[in-house]
Amino acid sequence: MKFEIIGGKTLKGEVKISGAKNNALKILASSLLFKNPIIIKNVPYIEDVFRMNELLKLLGVQISNPKKNTFILDSRNVKNFILDDKIAKRLRASIVVVGPLVGRFKKAVFPYPGGCVIGKRPIDIFLNSWKKLGINILEKNDLFTLKADKLDGTEIIFRVASVTATETILMTALMARGKTIIWNPAIEPEVLALIDFLKQSGAKIFVEKSKIEILGRNGKLLEFKKPFEIIPDRIEAGSFLILGSLLAENLKILNCNPQHLMSLVGILEEAGVEIKRGKNFFELKKPKMLKSVNVKTAEYPGFPTDLQAPLTVLLTQADGHSTVFETIYEGRLNYIEDLNRMGAKIFMCDPHRIIVFGKTPLRGRQIESPDLRAGLAFVIAALISSGKSIIENIYQIDRGYEGIDLKLQKLGLNIKRIV
Ligand code: EPZ
């Protein structure tokens, strides 16, 4: 499937933000920790969620979908502890399933997880932490076999504040005996939302700025008490803020949490965009001109790496030169060659740093979506370009954004899904 986009139109109207992919995937995986079925609402209807559900089903989790965006997961009959090789290799978040799986069964088998092509994605922090919890790890041909007689709470120091490692290890530690402390954990809103869900189901987890304490339940499963609502997708909301800054006569972004996006709001305000915000909405229009800004990606509450590519597209339209420093992944600037082919003037200093010279008009082209975030950046680039663009490999975009073409059409933009 491809997107055909005719650029150069302005947009107007309202858009509703879906549930966050990176919260939904972990909440779905946490179903393995429950002794009764769990009900999850506001789950985005996206390819990564479908892959996660397939992976869980193959382990024996029964999943129903009584209405769009609501899923019920029942892990009472799970007997299998081997992750499906093909799906796990396609989905980086598959490793999060291993956390509750090894916690519950004291064994798990999984392949090296796949995912986006955005640079090295090591798993050393996961492996070291599991070892500290008392798990033996055997690795053969990129297949990992985890086994433990018992899991004992311990103290773990993360070398870097990894999002999925925090989520995975805290779910393993929850099934251990005694207390575990994770120092230097990730505290992204999606991590905190997972902790909220576990806590409302009986888990004792304490979050401080530099550590998370988990009281192990010695194998005792959690009890589901009330439906959980996936938090709004801050990356989708942020992408619409960027798009609105480029094309909106007037745009209202609904069902979002502005507090999760303050770093981006600060950057856009410095670029000259006026943004109104309420408890769960943003409202904005494009300014007369955009000014250059220097940005650096960072862990939350810093500017998220997942918005770096869309923001770079915006910077091509800002007067003056901007610098972008991608600190999290080294493969996450690879899309700039394609932007340059569309007319941008971006200079790569090293794999982590670029200079964007603005303002440059963009021209439509045929381009391939390399990963989901750069894919959406190309959609934004195509929408501000003159002429027609074809974006290929939109499976990548459908991995993370629910009905993005329909949302853009509703705002008056010209985007079509074609075979
Ligand atoms: C999560 O990835 C997100 N994915 C990513 O979103 C997001 O870009 C990233 O966090 C940063 O916010 C999911 O939640 C499924 P990290 P994750 O471990 O957890 C290094 C998207 O587009 N590291 O926090 O994999 C790592 O290489 C995706 O939705 C190790 O060195 O990211 C990186 O430099 C892409 N060893 C840094 O930590 C490890 O064992 C932070 O990455 C683990 C990570």
Image (tube, rainbow, N blue to C red):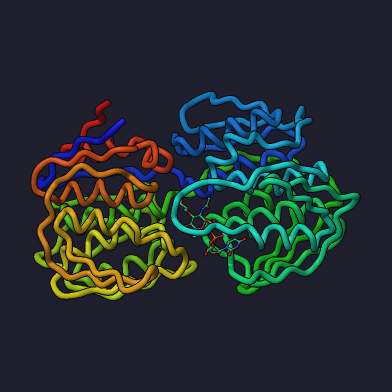
Q: Residue 347's x, y, as percent?
A: 24, 69
Can you say which quadrant of the picture contains the C terminus? top left
In the rendered picture of this protein, how many numbered marks are placed on residues? 0
Quadrant of residue 267 within the rendered picture: bottom left
Give the side of residue 334 with respect to residue 40, left or right.
left
What residue is rendered at 87% in x and 56% in y?
Answer: 177
Q: Nearer the viewer, residue 192 or 225?
A: 192
What residue is rendered at 36% in x and 50% in y?
Answer: 236
Q: Residue 228's x, y, as percent?
A: 58, 42
Tell me if residue 128 comes above or below residue 384 in the rendering: below
Tell me if residue 411 comes above or below residue 242 in the rendering: above
Quadrant of residue 318 within the rendered picture: bottom left
Q: Nearer the viewer, residue 281 or 180?
A: 180
What residue is rendered at 28% in x and 33% in y?
Answer: 2
Residue found farthest to the front: 141
Does residue 301 appear anywhere in the picture? no
Can you say which quadrant of the picture contains the N terminus? top left
Q: Residue 195's x, y, as percent?
A: 64, 55
Does residue 284 appear anywhere in the picture? yes
Residue found farthest to the right: 149
Give the side of residue 136 with respect to residue 336, left or right.
right
What residue is rendered at 80% in x and 51% in y?
Answer: 175
Q: Residue 390's x, y, as percent?
A: 21, 38
